[in-house]
Image (spheres, grey):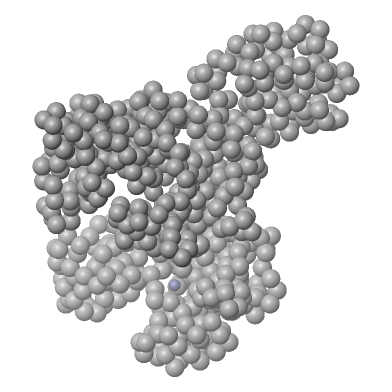
Amino acid sequence: MITITFPDNSKREYEKGVTPKAVAKAIAPGLAKKSVAAKIDGVLTELDRPIETDASLELVVKGTDAAFEVLNHSTAHLLAHAVKRLYPDARFGVGPAIDEGFYYDIKTDEAIRDEDLSRIEEMMRKIAKEDLPIKREVVTKEEAVSRFSADPYKQELLQEIEDDEITLYSQNGFTDLCRGGHVERTSLIRHFKLLSVAGAYWRGDSEREMLTRIYGTSWFTEEKLDEYLALREERRERDHRKLGKELKIFLLSDEAGQGLPIWLPNGFTVRRVLEEYVQRLERRYGYKHLSPPILGTRQLYETSGHFKHYKDDMFPLIEDEDESYVLRPMACPHHAIVYKSELRSYRDLPLRYAEIVTQYRYEKSGALSGLERVRAMTLTDAHIFARKDQIKHEVLSAYGLIRKAINDLGLTIEYVELALRDADKGKFHESDELWDEAEKVMKELLDEERIEYTEMKGEAAFYGPKIDIQVRTALGHIITMSTVQLDFLLPERFDLTYIGEDGKRHRPVLIHRGLISTWERLMSILLEQFKGAFPTWLAPTQAAIIPVSVEKHLDHANKLQGLFLDADYRTEVDDREEKLGKKIRDAQQKKIPFQLVIGDNEVEENTVTYRRYGEKEQHTVGFDEFMELFAKEIAQKK
Ligand SMILES: [Zn+2]
Ligand SMILES: [Zn+2]
């Protein structure tokens, strides 16, 4: 008899050689059906693997990540088997399970293309139906080397395995080198799809051969598979790289510099509308705007401490004989310099400085991604210099501003994180009194305002506690959109003071406020959110004016555009000699919120016939009435 220990630490006795499947059946009749594989002493393996000695056993059941991995990994073997039948010369690299499915790297003489995938998939279904058992076999390394003599990639992998015992898995003549963790039979693989083909260098090394990587995904039910494929399609439609290109929002060019996006006229128009909106909002909340240059001295960043802790993320220094400059990675030091340029009294505080700043970060080229990770990013950053007794009011006011901006953009706050210090006080700035006071008032105001938050003990920055505002994107990612960070350290480093009511010098507290991420990141989120169909207040072109006949109606169309321009609206006249239907389709494709058709009636009666983006219905109204509707829609930010 052997003793098996379960995850809840309970133990039971079994006959030597019992399989996980038999154990599952003995525990509960339904459990064997739900189980996909097993972990014996933490090692993933099959349900029919005999257990010979005392061991721990965990059943891998459907619905867990491990079960998904086993299924997808088994499907990768099935893919390789199908390819081997269709392309007898195929040599195989590696075929792992990944987050949302699996892939296999394959070399064939005749190239495999996207259009071949359905044929391969068909063969996979055929092999699955053959209901082949997936058999484990342990051989010596020598034996394995001879078995894979025709497969140079597997040979190379074998050379790197240090164990003398190698496990192989076979399904009716097709054998693969593998550590294990599979479903028991091919017929258990039912709901799968091959997704795409890409090139992949062998072992990720660009000096080596290019293999064909086939991606696929495999699920336990048809429903789950359909759900996943729908999500994939949704992601494709909302992909900001694709939309950014189609709608001419931004340009990424290696010739101009990796990770240095160029805002195109359409994208820059949206950004400018947002910038004006944000600056107006900030003025209402009592901010003053600054505009420092893009460079600062090395000394400035040495004082702030950025140079020491942040050097690897900065662009290399710009140096002359005795001068040394950095491209600004942060806005705060310049704002501290402005604070220090005058003698401040307690009556001057709080001082709120905001800036539209371009920051430069030297991200590794491999980390760059669309507008999500870039090397030059522009944002509306702000720094508030306040007295200790003003912390609560200022944090609350910053939060109010953030909430308004997020709502106006059509996004919603998912939750708020409050990062505090923990008992490990050495990790944090020493000023106990400031920490206690700041943490107390931040909690108080979140409670008073009934803002739901998660406390993150120990997650605060060295220099102070912070509130991070988390937003859910259209594709379900949670991102930190805004932040309010208290900083007790920077005022010390720059020796910032104000004269208090008592006539003595006091230290102000600095609050860093990030509003709506960077313009680049925000644009990627908004493209995703609106699928490129911006609401009228943000749209690069708010209305397309389409004359039915260029000859007869262009003059009137131009006249209307003049009136729109006077009112500061963004319109374009389609003066091409094209059919009306094509012009309307093109305006739809550009996702312009309104299409205005101008024909004989419209000219005679000074009306417009409009149609909204995505709608079929047309409405004819007087021009003035349309202007009213347009103005209302823009003001409401709908
Ligand atoms: Zn395997
Ligand atoms: Zn800052």
Q: Position of residue 61 (x, y in %)?
A: 33, 58
Q: Position of residue 259 (x, y in %)?
A: 53, 55
Q: Is 253 placed above or below 223 here?
A: below
Q: Position of residue 477 (x, y in %)?
A: 42, 45
Q: Residue furthest right?
A: 551
Question: What residue is rendered at 46% in x and 65% in y?
Answer: 321
In depth, the one of 174 and 234 nearer the eye is 234
Q: Is 410 placed above or below 138 here?
A: above
Q: As drawn, is 430 to the left or to the right of 357?
A: left
Question: What residue is rendered at 69% in x and 8% in y?
Answer: 622
Q: State whether residue 309 appears in this view.
A: yes
Q: State whether residue 610 appears in this view.
A: no
Question: What residue is rendered at 29% in x and 41% in y?
Answer: 340
Q: Residue furthest bottom?
A: 142
Q: Is 346 placed above or below 119 here?
A: above
Q: As drawn, is 248 to the left or to the right of 471?
A: right
